[in-house]
Amino acid sequence: MKPVIITFYRSVLGYLTLLIGGIIFLIITFLPPERLRFRAATFYCRAVLISIGVRLHIIGTYPPDQAYIYMANHSSFIDQFVLGGIMKGKFTAIVAQKQAKYFFWGWVLKRFRAVFIRRRDLTSAIASIKEAEERLKQGFQVGFMPEGTRTLDGKLGRLKKGGFHLAINTGAPILPIGIEGAFRFKPKGRLTVRPGPVIVRIGEPLTAEHYRQMTMEEVMENVRQQLLVLSGEVPAA
């Protein structure tokens, strides 16, 4: 099958799954018990990935014992579905404010208890971090993509400090997660998709006992080095 036909087929199937599955998910969010909402969200994300041609491979186990701040590299729009597809327990994420305005998807994110952030507005960004702190206290896993935006060349970009301040303020452990293959599947600016495998590697948690003995820069460098390896950009030692 020609690539353009594959792209069209997968795009149509993906949009239908996103819409129909999203409607079902929104209905479920209004039903008790609360844990059903998050199981439905994981199933929804997996369904979207399958429909657009992603074969997800997970290396490692997501620890279910407490609330984590999970940090991942960001190279494609599918990253949020990849992460949603592997989460356990209650989970949400810090996302760009503009996503709240997206038709339908904005509603899904709000029911998903997402924290919206305006990165260029310092006052708003600080308020969003405070809101994320409340999510952690409520037992949520809180996701953060420390690059702030998708990479344009597939390489890990410079990390921003917001999620690290969140960790230090709350004492929550940081869990690095690397995603390999998402950039090849669909980078920013390319219309076509390349169905294939996407590998998720779950790293070693960085606990408060460890990072409170480190400077902010040392914590960021630790996470950066883990993400480089976990994302496949740098070979494991």
Image: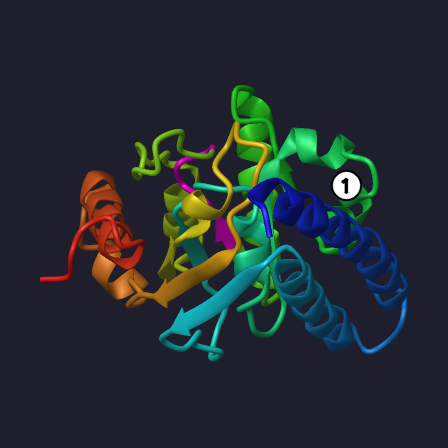
Residue 136 visible in the snapshot: no
- Quadrant (top left/top right/bottom left/bottom right) for the C terminus: bottom left
- Taking the spot 40% from the left edge, 77% from the top edge, the residue there is 61
Q: Quadrant of residue 102?
A: top right
Question: In the image, is 137 to the left or to the right of 9?
Answer: left
Residue 137 spot, x, y in % from top left:
57, 61
Residue 68 spot, x, y in % from top left:
46, 63
98 above or below 87? above
Residue 49 spot, x, y in % from top left:
61, 60
- In the rendered structure, does residue 201 fall within the stretch colored magenta? no
Of residues 141 and 183, the one nearer the viewer is 183
Question: In the image, is 103 to the left or to the right of 1?
Answer: right
- In the rendered structure, does residue 146 fall within the stretch colored magenta? yes
* Magenta part of the chain: 143-149
- Taking the spot 63% from the left edge, 68% from the top edge, the residue there is 90
| Secondary structure character of the magenta stretch overall | loop
58 above or below 231? below
Residue found at the far front of this picture: 1
157 above or below 135? above
Q: Quadrant of residue 57?
A: bottom left
Residue 188 visible in the snapshot: yes
Question: In the image, is 104 to the left or to the right of 229?
Answer: right
- Taking the spot 40% from the left edge, 63% from the top edge, the residue there is 199
- Circle 1 is placed at which residue position? 106
Residue 234 spot, x, y in % from top left:
18, 51
- Taking the spot 53% from the left edge, 69% from the top edge, the residue there is 86
Q: Secondary structure at mark 1?
A: helix
Mark 1, residues whose alpha carbon is within 10 Å: few (<14), some, or many (≥20)? some
Query: What residue type is disc 1 on?
Result: Gly
